[in-house]
Image (spheres, rainbow, N blue to C red):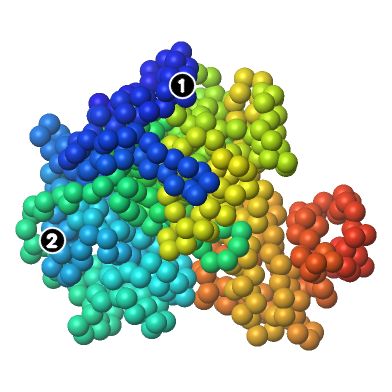
Amino acid sequence: MTLQIKSYSEYKKVYKNSVDNPEKFWAAQARTFTWMKKWDEVVEWDFKKPDVKWFVGGKLNITENCLDRHLKRSGNKTALIWEPNDPSQPYKTYTYNELYEAVCQCANMLKANGIKKGDRVCFYMPMVPELTIGVLACARIGAVHSVVFAGFSATALADRIKDSECKMVICSDYNFRGGKIIPVKEVVDDALKQRCKSVETVIVHQNSGDKVKMKKNRDKWWHDEVPRRRKTCPAVEMDSEDMLFILYTSGSTGKPKGVVHTCGGYMVYTCFTFKNVFQYQKGDVYWCTADIGWITGHSYIIYGPLLAGATTMMFEGVPTYPDAGRFWHICEKHRVNQFYTAPTAIRALMAQGDKWPSHYDLSSIKTLGSVGEPINEEAWNWYNEKIGKGKAPIVDTWWQTETGGIMISPLPGLHKVKPCYAMLPMPGVQPCLVDADGKEIRKKEAEGLLCIKYPWPSMIRTTYGDHERCRQVYFSAFEDKYFTGDGARRDKQGMYRIIGRVDDVINVSGHRIGTAEVENAINEHPQVIESAVVGYPHDIKGQGIYAYVITEGEIADPVAFKKSVHEVVTKVIGPIAKPDKIQIVPGLPKTRSGKIMRRILRKVASGDMDNLGDVSTLLNPQIVDSIKSSKDEAV
Ligand code: PRX
């Protein structure tokens, strides 16, 4: 069984061993899984290229470890609970046996429709069990899943389908979100009109049953295609380093990149961190509220929990439907033991008042988790007092799409937690702080750029189709280190606190958005000449999107203009990237080489107008005053 650390002193010992002898440590963890062939080498790595391989030569199938491995002893145990958007509708459960059969049927459907090992399959679906089933079915036959968050637009979906040349798209007809019903298949149809030549088949899961158009010879219903298949399907032998999935994420420049994760290391690491960070015990019900369209859903709704033989829950809806007590109602209803969510949700629910959690019995909760963005002290305290009743430790887990699994986190119940601190590196993780010159800061109490100086099993292997980009973005800033893009502080005890992104990435409600992407979208507006986007502090979302826009001609009605910008951004990216504030400006502060000085724009957006620093070196210093004085006109 995967090691579960039981005390702080054990953590210290395990951590030391994991750093002194990483290969021995990870080999011991890997041995607890089912391998079709044992690995020859534990790790081979070179951050310069980068080239990282874990459990080299090992053969496995991750679904054998998520499913088959549990059938003998826990086949009748609940693997998955699905809670629907509408609380008056029945919830669904799948035992490990049932999930196994469902996955095998879906895997056989994939094969019957020409999907082979290595082919890419795109998922564009709401939070329904078929998404989990489909993802695992891909892994079963060695197909590579690429899940696209169902809030992205047709254009964004098309970009992702094209980048990884997906052969199939699996979607739903519609998506229920609170009181709304949102078309899904229609978005896929629109995307596929945008030259997605690789797509041969679209499988449509019927969620609402409302009418959708089906294209002959391309579109097929899930209910016609899946249930008639055999309930067993051999697990395809995968190399440790074969691709398991691609997940697109935003960076500071260019289009979103497809982060590639591989089979062996990802399996070992997600299971290990799940068991330790949440201190999952047999019989517990674990609930992560993330969407499977993000890495948190991949690693800690699907893979980590199922690898550990846990009961994991998926929720289709939103935290405020039918009212702001929904999360707490679900916790009471399913006697949730570990609850994992994002600070944005905590802040939004906190703003609705204490009466909502007080209506429900939350006594089952043993551990609370936070992920995706820095948690502020007020939200931390509320979460601790009103949800955990001061008895459930909070794990503020820091990690990224690229890290595959949780990297820095408290271990609940094993030591005192410090509010807003992610605290301890997981065993095997070697973080460090680096100064602007790239020198590692040795002093314990320090602030700097967060890097990782030794590989860990679930780290990014490449960016799909563009390895050089992977090297450039993560491995070129500092020699022999993975650069996270985050700044962090370390206290006297060596505990880490994450400050946030130091690059041009904004974290809006825990969603990562590249400023360049939003600018490109805004620039498609016919009246926009140029734009610059920055983040600014936002009470609920953590960061909001602030856009400075140069327009062609006078804008008579800024509110109507904002609405039209929103429409363009929604069309190009999706509603999550809509600017919260738009300020029309006559020009943008630029350096003599023509680069936009975002530092100044960030300060103005956050209202910090007196400390703009030296602006005299700008090409157009006078523009700064003009931007400052028209700030109040932002809509
Ligand atoms: O800035 C950090 C922030 O989210 C970024 C990663 O975003 P993404 O790849 O979408 O993955 C989010 C879920 C793992 C990081 O670079 N972040 C993530 N967790 C935390 C955090 N910031 C502060 N505290 C955290 N616990």
Judging by the rendered image, the residue that carries numbered circle 2 is: 108
Judging by the rendered image, the residue that carries numbered circle 1 is: 20
**Quarter of image, res 489:** top right
Q: What type is the residue that disc 2 sits on?
A: Asn
* Residue 254 in view here: yes
Q: Residue at the spot x=68%, y=30% of the render?
A: 441
Q: Nearer the viewer, residue 574 or 240?
A: 240
Q: Residue at the spot x=52%, y=76% of the render?
A: 571
Residue 286: image location, x then y, percent: 33, 37
Residue 563's label in the rendered image is: none
Q: Residues within 10 Å of mark 2 (few under 14, many from 20)?
A: many
Q: Nearer the viewer, residue 288 or 16?
A: 16
**Does residue 398 appear left or right of residue 55 in this picture?**
right
**Does residue 153 appear left or right of residue 539 in this picture?**
left
Residue 488: image location, x then y, percent: 64, 37
Q: Nearer the viewer, residue 428 or 583?
A: 428
Q: Residue at the spot x=89%, y=69% of the render?
A: 620
**Quarter of image, res 229:** bottom left
Q: Secondary structure at mark 1?
A: helix
